[in-house]
Image: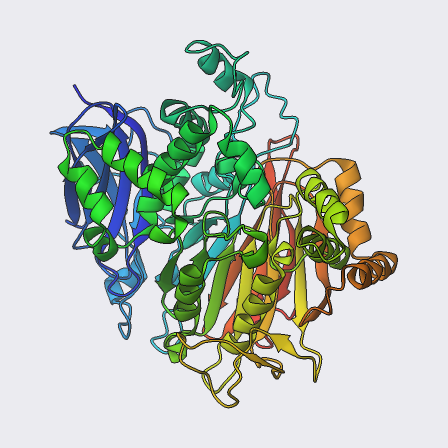
Amino acid sequence: MAGLRLGPLLRYVDWETGSTATVWVEASRPCTVEVRCADGAGGTAPTFSVAGHHYALVVVDGLTPGSTTAYEVLIGSRRVWPPEDSRLPPSTITTPLAPGATPTAERAAGDDTSSAADGHAPGGPADGRAPRGPADRGGSGSPDAPSGVRVSFGSCRWAAAPGDGNDPVGPDALVTLATRLAADPAAERPDVLLLLGDQVYADETSVATRRRLAARRDLDEPPGTEIADYEEYTYLYDESWRDPEVRWLLSTIPSCAVFDDHDVIDDWNTSAAWQRDLRATPWWHERIVSGLMSYWVYQHLGNLSPAELDADPVYAAVRAAPDGTEVLRRFAAEADAEPTRTRWSYRRVFGRVRLVMVDTRAARVLAEDRRAMLDPQEAAWVRSAVLDDPSSYDHLLIGSSLPWLLPPLIHDVERWNAALCAGVRGSRWARFGEKLRRAADLEHWAAFPDSFDRFTELLREAGSGPDAPATVCVLSGDVHHAYITEPHWPKGRRTPGADSTPGPRRDPAAGSGTTSGEAPTARVLQLTCSPVHNSVPRSIRAGFRFGWSRTGRRIGRALARHGRTGRSPVEWGREGGPWFGNQLMTLTLRGRNAALTLVQATAGAQGAQLEAVLERSLTPEDEAIFGHSTEC
């Protein structure tokens, strides 16, 4: 008899119609999976098989726009979710109102969170209150008030649960958020959760996972205690998603994900020399193929809309095969060998908010003479995804697992190092530069100078013109602390990668030239939040703080002169932080207003709690969001 092995995860919710969603599950054997909702919506899907595991991505149709409805998961006629003994609230799908629609009287009075099968909500609130979703944040039910979008984000979640209850890296922010929302289902919830990389750590396994690895192979042989193949990747997702509170949270809050290096290996695709060295090892091919296969199954598929899934030839081929393992293996091997054949980046729309999630790992060009964060095809797609139809959004969010703007000293070190590796100071300095690049993890946007300059110009262009959004925010993680920084475009500074044609926005597919650009009218920000559950040594903390200091900036300028790097097209200062701890940021976007909060998970006598560290307006009229002005 088939059972539910992992999930459900609520992944995609359609903000265009408010009537469609996708739910991901892993079953214990081949079967047909059904999602049944209390409002009559639902969907079914047969499982597909990969490496002895069985998955389904169920498209749920017929949802009521502007509502919150409970759902169940059934295999055959047997309910497998929620568990019979669950003390958590029902899993729900919250949909936005369709564009131009207004809340009905019934919906204003409360949504239907009853059980799809028996008319009650196991574990739900005693007073019957419904969780607050996007339709509730329109402002007292006024038809003229814009609905809000709440986006929570973070990265770097090492999910190993401590066996003795003493977590050496502190409380898990995702677990703490789940516990708080489960205790108060009427509390405001994120409308979407952005997981910005390092959802699993293939190169840093827990004691429990190592025991499982040791039961199937000799850990004295490479890759030792790291992940070797697809089966072992499934152990990581089990560990990350099986916690009861996190499992409930991911069944209720839609999520978007992108990989970073630890999803595969530390400093993945740092340089061409790094790649040659790894490809020469006997274990790397299986690791990278399995890493991309598991990412495709566990994370990437849920990023796609039903229409994108229908158009995906790999998805069709895997579903059509009795066993999709070899189909997916070929795809993953080709994606590693020829990155231009695959696009992991994607775009999502949340009302008047546009999210462009950018692959900053697999799409790199590593040859020193053509070094780029994004290959030409990927860069063209990102440019089009950002600039297409600018009048359709009020806020632009760009998800980049790696921060665009770093502390100035670290930025200058990475730019200087890239110049050394390119040979600007000769071969001896180039060899030194490569060693330093790997030892110090110098592989962020600044380590790809041309890409940094072009990306900076893209953000300036996106924030300019008559249809400019109110904010352009780059959302990042990776660096195990949180901070806010805002760039400034000095007048007259020439900007590599800009359009050579003055005037309004150009065709997104047009080429690039060199010009000096005016500062954007939108507020452009780098918002960095990491980790969700991890730590950073005190020495590294001190280094990050020093990177913002005046002395650090002077050292950075000296390195820039030595490396002949020239000036960056923008300057920036620290607007907030650095903050260290397990944490999540949340953007609340309503109309053309934006506000930011930062919460940290802290241990207390009553258990872990989320403590508000920051509440800040990002636009001048955000008193309506916080109830008071906290503008920076």
Please, is residue 621 above or below residue 599 in the view? Answer: below
> What residue is at 23 percent from the left and 36 percent from the top?
327
**Where residue 395 appears, x then y in whole percent?**
47, 70
**Where residue 136 appears, x then y in whole percent?**
38, 62
**Where residue 373 appears, x then y in whole percent?**
53, 56
> What residue is at 54 percent from the left and 51 percent from the top?
367
In this image, 495 relative to 49: left or right? right
Any part of residue 90 in sight: no
Q: How many marks?
A: 0
> What residue is at 66 percent from the left and 40 percent from the top?
438
The quadrant in which residue 95 appears is bottom left
From the viewer's side, name the closer residue of 429 and 491: 429
- Residue projecting furthest to the bottom: 503
> What residue is at 15 percent from the left and 45 percent from the top?
43
- Residue projecting furthest to the front: 427
Any part of residue 86 in sight: yes
Locate the N terminus by quadrant: top left
Please, is residue 451 above or below residue 75 in the view? Answer: below
From the viewer's side, name the closer residue of 516 and 429: 429
In this image, 476 relative to 20: left or right? right
Please, is residue 112 above or below residue 212 in the view? Answer: below
Locate the C terminus by quadrant: bottom right
